[in-house]
Image: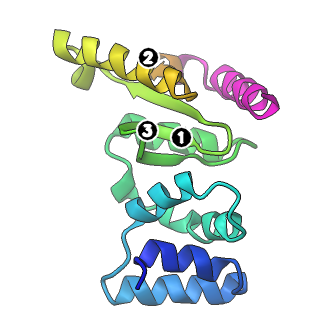
Amino acid sequence: MTTLPRTLLDLAASLSAERLEKVIGRAERLGLFDLRPVEALLLRAGGHRGAGRLRRALAHYRDDPAFVRSELERRFLALIRSSDLPVPSTNIFVEGYEVDAYWPESRFAVELDSFEFHHTREAFESDRRRQEELKLAGVEMIRVTWQRLEENPKGLVERIGTLLARRRGQ
């Protein structure tokens, strides 16, 4: 017996894209589908033959607003979707820490900082510890504020694109 995420990963290696989407849809209708455990498995899946196909099949589930918790996250995701950059996973756990946006293939994350959620001394310290732990685990992360997103969205997309390209080259 295997978990649903593992079953989906294994099926993705042999099913057509259309059939895989139907299987995922059926699991959703039965109330068995949860994106987070599937995303967590994909982070550990490495070179599994079904990993790429399963990621593609899950693309429209990542568009679900339930996985975006703030207006800043919503605007950031809209900006990324309007660019040529790949769309990141959002609000997922990486190395034991939840990150706002993550590109698993590049092991690159973006943390979206707003004063509303990051204004206490505890949050300030916790954010720095988390960034250090992720860096030690090989995950590069940058921080983006509302002001940076609003003032120069094109420049922000260019910088993220450059950083993603560098990470892929490593």
What is the chief secondary structure element of the magenta stretch?
Answer: helix
| Residue 132 badge | 2
**Residue 98, position as x, y percentages in the image:** 36, 39
The CA distance from mark 3 to mark 1 is 12 Å
Q: In which quadrant is the N terminus drawn?
A: bottom left
Q: Give the range drawn in magenta.
A: 149-170
**Residue 74, position as x, y percentages in the image:** 43, 43
Q: Name the residue under label 1.
A: 102
Coloring scheme of the render?
Answer: rainbow
The CA distance from mark 1 to mark 2 is 16 Å
**Residue 110, position as x, y percentages in the image:** 51, 30
Does the magenta-highlighted stretch encompass residue 126? no
Is 50 displayed left or right of 72 in the figure? right
Q: Look at the picture and state if 166 lies above or below 8.
A: above
* Label 2 environment density (alpha carbons within 10 Å; few <14, some 14–19, many ≥20): some
Asked if one can make out residue 63 in the rendered structure from this viewpoint, the answer is no
Q: Mark 3 points at which residue?
A: 95
Q: Look at the picture and state if 167 lies above or below 6.
A: above
Tag 1–tag 2 contact (CB < 8 Å): no
**Three-letter amino acid code at disc 2?**
Glu
